[in-house]
């Protein structure tokens, strides 16, 4: 009798689920001294890594990129064997993206002002160029995310802030559907008004530094759901859900 | 004789053997959600076999109802047309029948949102409909304010086979693969994903008719049909070459064609297969597979 044991499953490249982490590493992330947000942020990155690793499908399909603004100006992580090295890079290479299973969270440190607008442009450039790569290689992919966390206000000139906001609006809307852009504010100094102008989706305020972990857990679970889910499930970043 | 949902067809008089099964995705079980795939199998008294498969969208609140209703209406509409008009005998006539089936189905889904009370809003006809629209083509009008047709978002795949013809129409993802009498395989429809892998087209969206894939083939050269939802795409298709994966389908059809084994047994084995670790490793989505084998090809 013939059985289904003879059935072989096809192999197809994993669809890519890109999430660009856009992180504030300005000097204010060192305050308060006793409980630095930058330390909490680093813990959050570890939470993200550990949670993604638990999911066999997510760790293959989710890929991360890292853009920081603050220390060193605007920097992008270049990954080698999973380890991140922050550089002021030029050009798009594969090393700027790391699969979740290879990701080794860097230890970020903070300094300087907040060139948020330039960093937003950089993150959107990464998304655009990576999508071009996917298309030229015939790789299926999910709608990329840009996930921004900031505790202050941008120190770029106002017209640059406007240009960053415009670009986000041009790509994150029902027609273009180019990207999903989430903005999260870290109290107490964050300017939520500016975030609301930049982001199409309502920005979220962290309920205190303790909720970095919950935030990154939410992010990980969202990516995990995306790679598993049926078509079209929505995600809402709910302030209540991630409250500290 | 008709069966729907997750039971297989038990008609003793039908000529085609049909095995079908649906399993809920493991992520759905974890979240205590029901399977949102739905299928209907209907054997027309004139001998035609009618199959319909629909996959409700995860974002839609009434996805399951949408999928269920769509497959049921599609099969009934096709059956009614075959009864009243007889079997089409050329490609154009089959296409017209398929389109009429889809329009009937779409109309039926729209009527659901008119029956269900809107949140205090009265239904409003779309004042700004294009002049080019045929006044009788109600299905292109925007739904009334209040309850949205999106809540019933679903894909739809329909297959009608007679002795002489195979006709199929698909809006959305999943695929229909046929096996020819010489054993060769062909995907007669292909998953419609747009830009992003987790997006697709729905019969409930505006301008749905532009997204239909139509197939009309001569049936005698076909001995087997496989129809499946997007949960099986990764396992069954080879994307780069745009082909069905032969080592998946050939043993599957051979398995289904065993005339000396009961359909109940084969269907149960099919469920085990759909729930197997290897298949689930590619996705936690709902998986539905319908296999139809022409009796001339059954072997023992």
Image (tube, coloured by chain):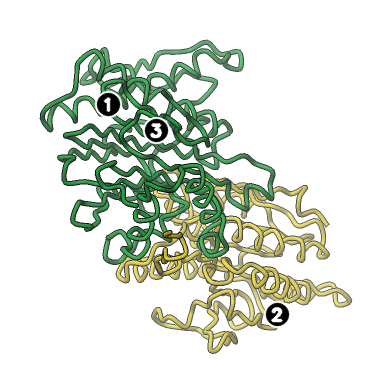
Q: Nearer the viewer, residue A191 or B226?
A: B226
* A33 horizontally vs B234: left or right: right
Instruction: Tell me the chain of label 1.
Output: B
Q: What is the crowding at mark 2: few (fewer than 14 residues within 10 Å), some, or many (at least 20)?
A: many
Residue A184 image-quadrant placement: bottom right
Marks 3/2: CA–CA distance: 48 Å
Q: Residue furthest right?
A: A34
* A224 horizontally vs B287: left or right: right
- Element class at badge 3: loop
Question: In the rendering, at what x and y percent does residue A18 appear?
Answer: 50, 66
Q: Nearer the viewer, mark 3 or mark 1?
A: 1
- Do circles 3 and 2 both sit on a common chain? no
Q: Nearer the viewer, mark 3 or mark 2?
A: 3
Residue to which mark 1 is pinned: B47
Task: Write the residue at 52% across / 10% down.
Answer: B122
Q: Nearer the viewer, residue A150 or B285?
A: B285
Residue B173 visible at all:
no
Tell me the colour chain B is drawn in.
Answer: green
Q: Quadrant of the N terminus of chain B?
A: top left
Task: Write the residue at 53% across / 37% down.
Answer: B6
Q: Nearer the viewer, residue A25 or B57?
A: B57
For residue A110, the mark is 2
Tell me the colour chain A is drawn in.
Answer: yellow
């Amino acid at each position: 009798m013939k059985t289904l044991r003879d059935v072989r499953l096809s192999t197809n490249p994993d669809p890519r689920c890109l999430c660009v982490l856009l992180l504030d590493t300005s000097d204010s992330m060192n305050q308060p001294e006793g409980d630095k947000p930058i330390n909490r942020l680093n813990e959050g990155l570890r939470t993200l890594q550990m949670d993604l690793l638990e999911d066999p499908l997510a760790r293959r399909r989710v890929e991360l990129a890292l853009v920081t603004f603050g220390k060193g100006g605007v920097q992008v992580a270049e990954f080698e064997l999973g380890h991140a090295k922050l550089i002021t890079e030029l050009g798009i290479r594969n090393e700027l993206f790391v699969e979740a299973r290879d990701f080794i969270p860097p230890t970020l440190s903070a300094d300087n002002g907040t060139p948020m607008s330039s960093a937003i442009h950089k993150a959107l450039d990464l998304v655009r160029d990576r999508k071009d790569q996917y298309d030229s290689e015939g790789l299926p992919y999910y709608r990329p995310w840009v996930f921004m966390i900031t505790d202050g206000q941008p120190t770029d000139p106002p017209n640059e802030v406007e240009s960053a906001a415009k670009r986000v609006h041009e790509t994150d809307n029902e027609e273009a559907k180019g990207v999903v852009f989430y903005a999260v504010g870290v109290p107490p100094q964050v300017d939520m008004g500016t975030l609301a102008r930049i982001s199409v989706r309502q920005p979220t305020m962290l309920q205190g530094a303790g909720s970095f972990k919950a935030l990154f857990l939410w992010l990980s679970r969202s990516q995990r759901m995306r790679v598993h889910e049926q078509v079209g499930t929505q995600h809402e970043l709910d302030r209540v859900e991630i409250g500290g | 004789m008709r069966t729907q949902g997750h039971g297989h067809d038990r008609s003793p008089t039908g000529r085609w053997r049909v095995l079908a099964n649906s399993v809920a995705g493991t992520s759905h079980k974890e979240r205590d959600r029901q399977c949102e795939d739905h299928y209907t199998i209907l054997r027309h008294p004139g001998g035609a076999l009618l199959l319909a498969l629909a996959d409700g969208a995860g974002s839609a609140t009434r996805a399951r109802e949408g999928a269920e209703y769509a497959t049921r209406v599609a099969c009934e509409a096709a059956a009614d047309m075959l009864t009243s008009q007889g079997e089409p005998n050329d490609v154009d006539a089959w296409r017209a029948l398929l389109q009429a089936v889809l329009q009937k189905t779409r109309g039926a889904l729209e009527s659901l949102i008119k029956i269900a009370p809107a949140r205090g809003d009265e239904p409003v006809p779309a004042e700004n409909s294009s002049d080019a629209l045929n006044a009788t083509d109600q299905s292109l009008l925007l739904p009334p304010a209040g309850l949205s047709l999106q809540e019933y978002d679903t894909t739809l795949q329909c297959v009608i086979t007679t002795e002489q013809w195979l006709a199929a129409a698909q809006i959305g993802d999943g695929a229909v693969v046929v096996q020819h009498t010489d054993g060769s395989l062909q995907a007669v429809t292909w998953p419609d994903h747009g830009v992003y892998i987790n997006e697709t087209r729905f019969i409930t969206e505006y301008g749905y008719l532009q997204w239909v894939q139509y197939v009309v083939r001569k049936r005698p050269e076909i001995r087997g049909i496989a129809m499946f939802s997007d949960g099986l795409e990764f396992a069954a298709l080879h994307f780069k070459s745009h082909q069905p994966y032969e080592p998946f389908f050939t043993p599957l059809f051979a398995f289904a064609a065993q005339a000396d084994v009961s359909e109940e047994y084969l269907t149960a084995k099919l469920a085990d297969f759909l729930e197997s670790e290897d298949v689930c490793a590619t996705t936690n989505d709902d998986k539905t597979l319908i296999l139809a084998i022409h009796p001339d090809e059954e072997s023992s």
